[in-house]
Amino acid sequence: MMVRWQLTYRHHQAVRVDSSNRRGSMALAAMMSLLVIIGGVAVALDRLWLDNAQTELEAAVEAAALRGGQFLASDDLLRLEFDIETRLELARNEAGSIADQNLIAGEPVELNAAPDGDIRFGRLVRRERTGADVFLETSDRPTSVVVRGTHSRSRNNPVAMFLNSVSGSDGADVSAMSEASIDNRVLSLRPLAGVPVPVLPIAILRDGGEDRTGESWESQIENREGADNYGFDEQTGEITKGPDGIPEIRVRSAVRRGNPEEANVHLFVVSDSATIEQLVSHVSNGWSEQDMPSQLAELRLDQEAHEFKTVNGINGPTPEAIEQLLGECRILFLYDEFIPRGRSGAGHVQITRAVAGRVLSIKELGDDSSELVIQPGVMTTRTAQLASEFSGATGSRTQKRGNEESREKLANRYIYKLQITN
């Protein structure tokens, strides 16, 4: 009996040891599985975190490039002399400031705004053999800006990761590049969804010939014969008294019961059915998609002329609406021929060219006419449609060269389109 009991006791003890070993092995396996799962989750989170940081940096450098590009299309282009280095330094600082307002992984995006840093200016040069546009760095009338953003260990600003403490790494490297360019080879103006064409619908006499040399855009602005009594600060938006290197033109609308052909500026409507309320809206807001008639979805600038209906002078509620725009750069138009209807200033005007400028002063006179002082300006607009967007992508080398020459003829010194080009 004693022997049998000892065997039984040993059997139960062996079962208990084996069961304990199995439970320990299972616990260890469960712990290892949990560590693998946690590690996998951490890796996945790090991947998502890094992808998000990459997207944030790309958005930041794109915004910085667009901001820098805005300073390439400035009123300085209309001055005979200006300090390009000062302009580029301002553009670099503004681009860097925009980047700093964006975040990457919760931290401000850092750009080196030094001349040899992350923000470079130049031109896009087309290679004859391949037809590709290549960025050439230069400070001679640059039209493109390239912004490179880098957050890396070499710069002591890497993107922190969840597994940093495990791997012993300081973080991950992230980089992005964006290129923005201005182009003034404008084929047409077209309203976009929610984006009106920024026009001020007035037409100014383009060339008055020998009899009206002091009243035309050609003589006063293009030939720089106009007075330079005003200035405009693009940074502050302030209109100042005194010269700033850009001449002005003084224009006057039709006089009540006078000779409307003596006026050198006319207010016109894009649609014959437009009401005075709609005209005031055009003055204040420009042309939206709803304002354009069905037969004129876009205003082509490569055509000889567009005929529009004018109203009887600049009076009523329109001078007050124009006064609210003082200093704001808008697209204006030039005309070669005005066909009066009666003696009120109403009639038809033949528009031949689009320019840009800002009203610096408006004064209502006692004969239902208004006198305006207008200074040319340089502006960018998303509503400009470029010739390069419609032609020249295919064809023989001779055809491509001809297309390029045709596009160059459309170059507008006042109106540009700013867009991401890489």
Image (spheres, rainbow, N blue to C red):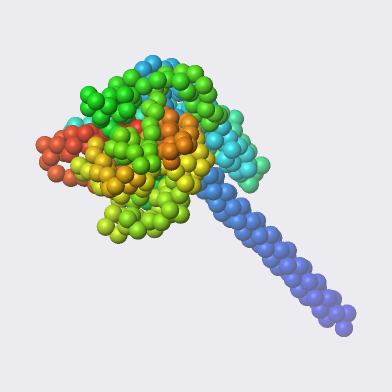
Q: Nearer the viewer, residue 91 or 108?
A: 91
Is residue 298 placed above or below 95 in the rendered structure?
Answer: below
Which part of the image, by quadrant, shows the C terminus?
top left
Give the mark count.
0
Q: Residue furthest right?
A: 2
Q: Position of residue 163 (x, y in %)?
A: 62, 45
Q: Is residue 181 above or below residue 15?
A: above
Residue at image x 18%, y 37%? 406
* Looking at the image, residue 376 lies above or below residue 267: above
Q: Which residue is the extreme one toward the bottom?
A: 1
Does residue 196 appear left or right of residue 409 in this picture?
right
Residue 337: quadrant of the picture: top left
Viewer-nearest residue: 173 or 72? 72
Name the residue located 14 percent from the left edge and 36 percent from the top edge: 402
Q: Nearer the viewer, residue 368 or 333?
A: 368
In terms of image quadrants, where is residue 37? bottom right
Q: Residue at x 27, y 27 (%)?
A: 212
Residue 174: x percent and y percent? 51, 39
Whole-percent x and y of residue 149?
Answer: 49, 34
Name the residue rendered at 44%, 43% in the picture: 315
Considering the image in quadrants, where does the N terminus appear? bottom right
Q: Position of residue 305 (x, y in %)?
A: 22, 43
Q: Can you tell which quarter of the image residue 128 is in?
A: top left
Residue 111 in view, yes or no: no
Residue 274 seen in the current view: yes
